[in-house]
């Protein structure tokens, strides 16, 4: 069983043992992903990838995900003004990550992998890790944390297969072929391809404005079209991410400290 919170506490205690377990913590967001898809891909995708990675490692557990993420931004998530997009501020996210890592470390865990599924979270996760490690040092605990965003493990070969007409970049992939393919593979009941709004990838000026200007965002809420998404692409994307992340984690935690 890979999901930590599904265990009873005594089984968990025995799995944690001498600090040998790898704790994978998915971190996502609840935000709109267009009319064709549910609002939870940023949580469900890193959680599924974490479960896949845990199965390839000797002793790994997937912690319950942090579902809420930092405020959706216009140029990467469509913006924080759509009904349903439900975000927390940076300070709350930093504190949540810090508190959760500290708690798992106090149980005896020393190896962590934070698996991000929402671009906007990135530096707040780093800050949460930094504050957690500093806090733990005062308790005499030395922990190690690997942090990653799953799309960085999609190989060039896979990009060429999934985007045969050319790849416009991860920044405009919000609700596009990457996430929709993964969701078609993992949770087809949460996707309706008949509702995909087909449009050219969004383009933005090289600056932001605040308050955000909703007219910058395609009416669909997606930043590129999911028309070419398939469950087969999703299976391929899942496999490269799981294998790549498992290899990186194995290499890092077996390396001499
Ligand atoms: Zn997303
Ligand atoms: Mn997102």
Image (cartoon, rainbow, N blue to C red):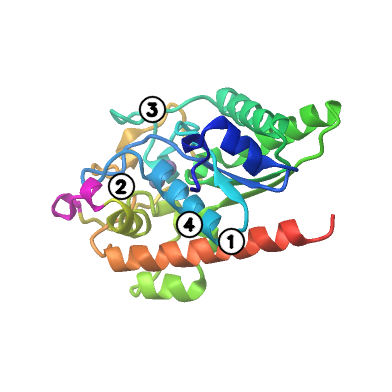
Start and end of the magenta stretch? Answer: 188-197
Q: Earlier in the sequence, mark 1 or mark 3?
A: 3
As helix, strand or loop, the secondary structure at mark 2 comes to loop
Give the x, y percent position of residue 167: 41, 67
Q: Quadrant of residue 158?
A: bottom left
Label 1, residues with CA under 10 Å away: few <14, some 14-19, many ≥20: many
Q: Nearer the viewer, mark 1 or mark 3?
A: 1
Q: Nearer the viewer, mark 2 or mark 3?
A: 3
Q: Which residue is mark 3?
A: 86
Whether tag 4 and tag 1 are in contact, CB under 8 A, the answer is: yes
As helix, strand or loop, the secondary structure at mark 1 comes to helix
Q: Earlier in the sequence, mark 2 or mark 3?
A: 3
Give the CA separation, mark 2 to mark 3: 16 Å
Give the CA separation, mark 3 to mark 4: 27 Å
Check residue 205 for magenta coloring: no
Give the CA separation, mark 4 to mark 2: 27 Å
Is residue 205 something one can see in this rendering?
no
Q: Which residue is mark 4?
A: 52
Q: Which residue is mark 1?
A: 246
Q: Earlier in the sequence, mark 3 or mark 4?
A: 4
> Regarding ligand 2, which quadrant of the image does it lie in?
top left
As helix, strand or loop, the secondary structure at mark 3 comes to loop
Task: Using the image, tell me which numbered label, if any, was put on residue 257.
Answer: none
- Magenta segment, prevailing SS (helix, strand or loop): helix
Q: Which residue is mark 2?
A: 222
């Amino acid at each position: 069983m890979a999901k930590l919170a599904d265990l009873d506490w005594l089984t968990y205690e025995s799995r944690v043992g001498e600090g040998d377990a790898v704790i994978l913590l998915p971190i996502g967001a609840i935000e709109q992903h267009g009319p064709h898809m549910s609002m939870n891909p940023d949580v469900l995708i890193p959680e599924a990838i974490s479960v896949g990675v845990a199965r390839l490692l000797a002793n790994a557990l997937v912690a319950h995900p942090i579902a809420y993420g930092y405020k959706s931004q216009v140029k990467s998530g469509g913006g924080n003004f759509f009904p349903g997009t439900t975000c927390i501020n940076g300070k709350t996210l930093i504190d949540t990550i810090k508190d959760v890592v500290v708690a798992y470390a106090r149980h005896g865990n020393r190896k962590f992998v934070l698996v991000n599924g929402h671009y906007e979270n990135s530096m707040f996760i780093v800050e949460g890790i930094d504050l957690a490690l500093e806090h733990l040092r005062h308790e005499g605990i030395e922990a190690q944390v690997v942090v990653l965003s799953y799309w960085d493990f999609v190989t060039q070969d896979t990009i060429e297969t999934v985007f045969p007409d050319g790849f416009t970049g991860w920044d405009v992939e919000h609700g596009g072929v990457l996430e929709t393919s993964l969701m078609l593979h993992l949770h087809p009941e949460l996707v309706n391809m008949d509702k995909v709004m087909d449009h050219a990838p969004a383009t933005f000026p090289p600056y932001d404005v605040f308050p955000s200007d909703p007219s910058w965002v395609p009416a669909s809420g997606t930043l590129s079209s999911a028309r070419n998404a398939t469950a087969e692409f999703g299976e391929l994307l899942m496999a490269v991410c799981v294998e790549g992340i498992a290899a990186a984690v194995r290499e890092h935690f077996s390396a001499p400290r």
